[in-house]
Amino acid sequence: MTVSELISILEDLDPNARVLIMMQQSWPFECRVRGVTVREEIVRSECGGDECDDPDEPGAFEHEYEEGTSGTDVFLVEGGQVRYGSKAAWDCV
């Protein structure tokens, strides 16, 4: 799924509705969303200084990502289980 596909799905929904993640199809859980990040932020956070001289300097951060990944990959970060979910959720998408 791309960001534009997700935006398209969400734009017709109640903007005040809570967002939860239904995860683990074989044993479903409803989970809160803690936040959103991108792969580049994660790599920068892991950077101990060896890979990048000044990670905050515009254009200075260079990283070779694993094949099939990109610094722009978006992650919805799980914020903890709320309750058990329903296997039927996977039938609805």
Image (spheres, rainbow, N blue to C red):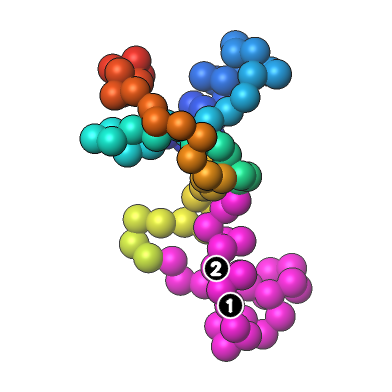
Identify the residue at horizontal 71%, vertical 80% (top origin).
Answer: 54
40 drawn magenta: yes
Residue 33 image point, x, y percent: 57, 39
Judged from the image, the secondary structure of the residue bearing numbered disc 1 is loop
- Quote the CA–CA distance across marks 1 and 2: 6 Å
Residue 86 image point, x, y percent: 34, 23
Identify the residue at horizontal 75%, vertical 73% (top origin).
Answer: 57
| Quadrant the N terminus occupies | top left
Residue 70 image point, x, y percent: 47, 56
The residue furthest bottom is 50
| Quadrant the C terminus occupies | top left
Q: Is residue 47 left or right of residue 16?
A: left
52 drawn magenta: yes
Looking at the picture, which amino acid does disc 1 mark? Answer: Cys
Visible residue check, residue 6 = yes
Q: Which mark is residue 47?
A: 1
Visible residue check, residue 74 = no
Q: Is residue 10 left or right of residue 22?
A: right
Q: What's drawn in magenta, residue-wise?
A: 37-65
